[in-house]
Image (spheres, rainbow, N blue to C red):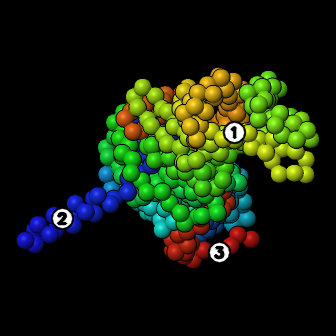
């Protein structure tokens, strides 16, 4: 009995589980591009390392190694992989770091100084990024794991005291190697938790689309990684700005992502589009009124001829009044996605009236319009754009079948008026598009749209419009050198004295 009750509760919870309206999959095809950008990012971050000065005394020799800077990162082997539970893992083996520092040496009254190049060999770095959902529904780097080591240092000392430097080089390079080992991971932790998170902050979570509606792109759960891809489920729901707490129940099918040929796949269910249209409906955005000169001249003449009998019965001051054509959507439009294409069904009222100056308008007719629009989706940059086309159109009277027959001559001109006068205005808005939840500086290119039963998918490749470090630094705090290992420097300069 207890087992049956638990099973019933599980089924009930599943029945009320909300499906995502938008899904994004990053495939392993994107890893090479992401790795190249990530390595450039890593090299720029490592150049910010600041190593404490090494000062000390050996016999009658006083030395000072200062202004140590990382100049370049040279790679021989690197891999970036998806790993379950860790999400992203970057592994670098047998790399080398170029360094430059200033040397100063004092022996009795003899002084030698200048700059010298060095290298840190056998550099190994293994760092992992763990991604999660924060309380606001935003994706964050929640943890950075790091292991780093430098196996050896090499510096080609020269000058007057070359033999002395050869004697001291083992001591000096050992100290520098120890300090480098202590510095690499703090730099990577700062890059992941500060700079990358500042870049992720540019992904919209709840933002306005225009003056009427907004969109909710909050993550529904933590990102899920497998060995071949990274999946993210977004709510993908629109809402009226005047009713921010309103939400449309999601009764659409859950989008499925199976393809892996492109770098990224984005899936949208019928719910995504239905919530947009219902939000505009609730915000009063699905209505249009054309008065006077806004009504096309040919349509104005046709309407006046059609309702000539009603018009001549009016008073003379009303007969020549401007004509008004008003369209008002009666119920939220609905989207249907099939493998053959995407359609939107709309039911609206059409009211025709005369509007005499300073007098109440005089209604000539009121009818109902059923229309079906085809919708073609495209992804440009970071914007999902829609192109609408009027396919089916029918008008009928709300009062009698006889009046519906009388409206047949208006069918063709009204459809033409919608195609010429109304559809361009709709497409101007829908073609501006809605931003996809993607960080700034990254765009989609070479997209392919595929329709399925109840949802559509868009496969695309990624393009970095700007360098990862440049974009992250613009939004986050500046990457400052991390000074560490003071306890090591203190141990190295026991009995040390400042140079005169």
The residue at 65%/23% (across/down) is 409
Q: Quadrant of residue 9?
A: bottom left
Mark toward the viewer: 1 or 3: 1
Q: Position of residue 204 (x, y in %)?
A: 58, 54
Q: Position of residue 255 (x, y in %)?
A: 38, 43
Q: Do callouts 2 and 3 mark residues in contact (Cβ within 8 Å)?
A: no
Q: Of label 2 and label 1, which has the lower sequence position?
A: 2
Give neighbour class at mark 2: few <14, some 14-19, many 20+ (Cα, 10 Å): few
Give neighbour class at mark 3: few <14, some 14-19, many 20+ (Cα, 10 Å): few
Residue under pointer 2: 8
Q: Do callouts 2 and 1 mark residues in contact (Cβ within 8 Å)?
A: no
In the picture as drawn, the residue positioned furthest to the bottom comes out as 495
- Can you tell which mark lies on residue 134? none
Q: What quarter of the picture does the C terminus occupy?
A: bottom right
Cα–Cα span, label 2 and label 1: 55 Å
The residue at 76%/41% (across/down) is 353
Give neighbour class at mark 1: few <14, some 14-19, many 20+ (Cα, 10 Å): some
> Which one is in front, 358 or 280?
358
Residue under pointer 3: 497
Q: Of label 2 and label 3, which has the lower sequence position?
A: 2
The residue at 10%/68% (across/down) is 3
Q: In the figure, is residue 146 to the left or right of 46?
A: left
- Under circle 2, the secondary element is helix
Cα–Cα span, label 2 and label 3: 78 Å
- Under circle 1, the secondary element is strand
The residue at 69%/66% (across/down) is 108
Residue under pointer 1: 365
């Amino acid at each position: 009995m207890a087992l049956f009750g638990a099973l019933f509760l599980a089924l009930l919870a599943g029945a009320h589980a909300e499906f995502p309206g938008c899904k994004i999959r990053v495939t392993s095809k994107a890893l090479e591009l992401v790795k190249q950008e990530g390595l450039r990012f890593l090299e720029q971050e490592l150049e910010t390392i600041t190593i404490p000065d090494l000062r000390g005394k050996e016999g009658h020799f006083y030395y000072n190694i200062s202004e140590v800077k990382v100049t370049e990162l040279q790679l021989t082997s690197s891999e970036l992989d998806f790993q379950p539970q860790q999400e992203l893992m970057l592994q670098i083996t047998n790399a080398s770091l170029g360094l430059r520092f200033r040397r100063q040496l004092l022996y009795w009254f003899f002084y030698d100084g200048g700059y010298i190049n060095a290298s840190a060999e056998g550099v190994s770095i293994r760092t992992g990024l763990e991604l999660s959902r924060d309380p606001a529904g935003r994706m964050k780097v929640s943890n950075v794991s790091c292991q780093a080591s430098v196996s050896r240092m090499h510096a080609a000392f020269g000058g007057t005291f070359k033999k002395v430097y050869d004697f001291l080089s083992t001591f000096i390079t050992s100290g520098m190697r120890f300090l480098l080992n202590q510095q690499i991971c703090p730099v990577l932790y700062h890059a992941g938790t500060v700079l990358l998170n500042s870049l992720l902050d540019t992904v919209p979570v709840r933002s306005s689309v225009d003056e009427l509606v907004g969109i909710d792109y909050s993550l529904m759960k933590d990102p899920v990684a497998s060995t071949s891809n990274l999946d993210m489920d977004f709510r993908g729901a629109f809402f009226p700005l005047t009713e921010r707490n309103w939400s449309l129940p999601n009764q659409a099918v859950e989008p499925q992502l199976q393809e892996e040929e492109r770098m990224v796949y984005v899936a949208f269910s019928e719910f995504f589009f239905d919530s947009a249209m219902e939000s505009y409906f609730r915000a009063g955005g699905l209505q249009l009124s054309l008065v006077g000169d806004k009504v096309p001249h040919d349509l104005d003449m046709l309407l006046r001829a059609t309702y000539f009998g009603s018009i001549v019965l009016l008073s003379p001051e009303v007969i020549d009044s401007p004509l008004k054509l008003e369209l008002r959507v009666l119920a939220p439009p609905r989207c249907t996605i099939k493998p053959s294409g995407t359609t939107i069904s709309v039911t609206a009222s059409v009211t025709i009236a005369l509007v005499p100056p300073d007098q109440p308008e005089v209604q000539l007719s009121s009818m109902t319009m059923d229309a079906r629009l085809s919708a073609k989706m495209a992804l440009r940059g970071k914007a999902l754009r829609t192109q609408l086309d009027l396919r089916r159109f029918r008008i009928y009277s709300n009062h009698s079948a006889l009046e519906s027959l009388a409206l047949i001559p208006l069918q063709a001109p009204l459809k033409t008026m919608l195609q010429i006068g109304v559809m361009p205005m709709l497409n101007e808005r829908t073609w501006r598009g809605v931003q996809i939840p993607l960080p700034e500086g990254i765009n989609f290119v070479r997209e392919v749209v595929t329709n399925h039963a109840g949802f559509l998918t868009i496969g695309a490749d990624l393009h970095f419009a700007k360098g990862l470090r440049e974009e992250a630094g613009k939004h986050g705090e500046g990457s400052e050198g991390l000074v560490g290992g003071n306890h090591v420097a203190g141990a190295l300069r026991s009995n040390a004295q400042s140079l005169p």
